[in-house]
């Protein structure tokens, strides 16, 4: 098998995998930048990309690399208690730990330090995630409004009500506040950690956001700059 090369890395507000949306596009307010590796910083490779509104990103679950694999996994959307076939899910624990995300292309920028970079919205990738390929999203071939979503069709039922005190929300940069609210509403907790008396910590955009969850209400308790 030929080697797969890392062509770029994602620059995002998530320093750890905790709290990253479980699918791309769930939090449209998220802003990230794709920075190409030095050997792939060729503007010609991106010629015409500005004509597309969305892109497919093929990347590596770099924090989930392991030598073995399991034919079944426990999807978070099923509470972490029901097993489904790994190929019927988007679990990171796969034979080849490859991820697939659709992101919105917000802009193409020429920079002095990194060459041409891509600014994207709605990405579900951790900071520094390796990217193997980028392909344009083509509506006539990739969009299927009639498609069935299996057990994921109930995803909207998992949203939490977020109580974020104004004095704490004001600590975050203005351009990061809505994204933080949306990330929290999608319940960052692992499916196996649902204790009402536990204080959870989310690292986002250089801040440590501490919160508790009781029933369907998430309450932010503290925000500190890291």
Image (tube, rainbow, N blue to C red):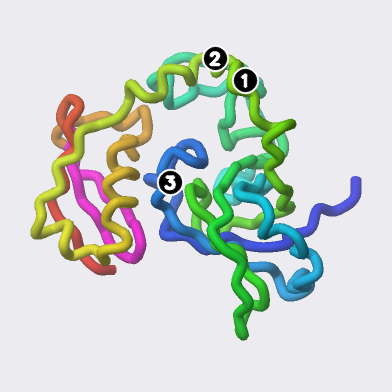
Q: Earlier in the sequence, mark 2 or mark 3?
A: 3
Numbered circles on residues, count: 3
Majority secondary structure of the magenta segment? strand
Q: Is residue 2 above or below residue 144?
A: below
Q: Which residue is mark 3?
A: 28
Q: How far across and how far down the image is residue 87, in percent?
A: 66, 23
The span from disc 2 to disc 1 (Cα, nearest Å) is 9 Å
Q: Which residue is mark 1?
A: 88
**How busy is the neighbourhood of tag 1: few (under 14 within 10 Å), some, or many (20 plus)?**
few
Q: Which residue is mark 2?
A: 150
Residue beneath the point at 61% across and 47% down: 54
Q: Earlier in the sequence, mark 1 or mark 3?
A: 3
Q: Is residue 189 above or below residue 181?
A: above
Query: In the rendered structure, does residue 206 fall within the stretch colored magenta?
Result: yes
Q: How far across and how far down the image is residue 56, in percent?
A: 66, 45
Q: How far across and how far down the image is residue 201, in percent?
A: 27, 50
Mark 1 and mark 2 in contact (Cβ < 8 Å)?
A: yes
Q: Nearer the viewer, mark 2 or mark 3?
A: 3
Q: Assign the N terminus to one quadrant of the image.
A: top right
**How busy is the neighbourhood of tag 3: few (under 14 within 10 Å), some, or many (20 plus)?**
some
Q: Assign the C terminus to one quadrant of the image.
A: bottom left
Q: How far across and how far down the image is residue 41, in percent?
A: 74, 73
Which segment did they paint magenta?
A: 198-213
């Amino acid at each position: 098998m030929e080697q797969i090369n890392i062509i770029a890395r994602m620059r995002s507000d998530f320093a750890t995998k905790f709290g990253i949306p479980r699918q791309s596009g769930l939090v449209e307010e998220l802003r990230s930048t794709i920075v190409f590796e030095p050997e792939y910083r060729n503007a010609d490779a991106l010629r015409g990309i500005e004509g597309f509104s969305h892109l497919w990103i093929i990347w590596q679950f770099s924090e989930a690399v392991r030598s073995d694999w399991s034919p079944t996994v426990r999807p978070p959307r099923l509470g972490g208690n029901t097993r489904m076939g790994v190929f019927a899910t988007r679990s990171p624990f796969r034979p080849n730990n490859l991820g697939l995300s659709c992101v919105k292309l917000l802009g193409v920028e020429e920079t002095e330090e990194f060459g041409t970079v891509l600014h994207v919205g709605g990405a579900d990738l951790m900071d520094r995630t390796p990217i193997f390929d980028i392909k344009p999203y083509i509506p006539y071939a990739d969009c299927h409004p009639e498609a069935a979503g299996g057990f994921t069709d109930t995803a909207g039922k998992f949203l939490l009500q977020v109580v974020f005190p104004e004095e704490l929300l004001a600590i975050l940069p203005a351009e990061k506040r809505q994204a933080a609210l949306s990330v929290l509403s999608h319940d960052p907790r692992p499916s196996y950690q649902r204790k009402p008396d536990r204080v959870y910590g989310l690292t986002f955009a250089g801040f440590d956001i501490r919160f508790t969850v009781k029933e369907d209400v998430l309450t932010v308790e503290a925000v500190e700059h890291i």
